[in-house]
Amino acid sequence: MAVSAYDPENIFAKILRGEIPCKKVFENEWALAFHDIGSKAPVHVLVIPKKPYVSFVDFSARASEDEITGFTRTVGHVATALGLDEPGYRLISNVGPDSGQEVPHFHVHLLGGRRLGALVSP
Ligand code: AMP
């Protein structure tokens, strides 16, 4: 899948620059975690890298090993801090048009707090 150019005017870029607010859960040098505005579960948090990547395709190809490690560990830390490990949770990252990706800044959805339904409709 081709990776389009990063759009610095996407909504998550604006959140990272502090131009629009978010309900922050956690932040470190690698990532920012905040509540999804259109929550689909009792817990619905987005974790985004600080640097500009369009999607997982872009992130997995271009991010340094330190960034990948730092980001991945942060996602795990946030899930644990939210108390999700034991009941369990779902991690989703939408990539491109078929997935319905709306925001072209790589992000991971952390969903939990109840029994989640089937992953995809047939
Ligand atoms: P995706 O379809 O994977 O690109 O998901 C984008 C997500 O971003 C959706 O679940 C939206 O509800 C969420 N979203 C859009 N704008 C905001 C915002 N300003 N603050 C928090 N979440 C947002």
Image (cartoon, rainbow, N blue to C red):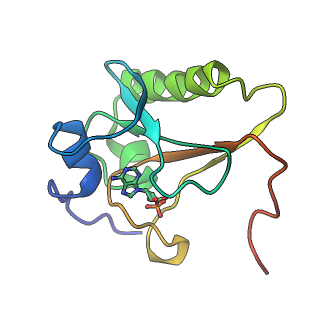
Of 2 and 117, which appears nearest the observer? 117
The image position of residue 57, as x and y in percent, is: 43, 54
The image position of residue 49, as x and y in percent, is: 36, 36
Eyeballing the image, is 36 above or below 83? below
| Numbered label tally | 0
Is residue 30 toward the left or the right of residue 33 in the image?
left
Is residue 27 toward the left or the right of residue 76 in the image?
left
- Farthest residue to the bottom: give it: 122
- Say which quarter of the image contains residue 55: bottom left
Image quadrant where one finds the N terminus: bottom left
Eyeballing the image, is 62 above or below 99? above
The residue drawn where x is 43% and y is 37% is: 34
Of 73 and 117, which appears nearest the observer? 117
- Say which quarter of the image contains residue 96: bottom left
Of 97 and 109, which appears nearest the observer? 109
Eyeballing the image, is 118 above or below 13? below
The residue drawn where x is 76% and y is 76% is: 121
The image position of residue 41, as x and y in percent, is: 67, 51
The image position of residue 72, as x and y in percent, is: 52, 28
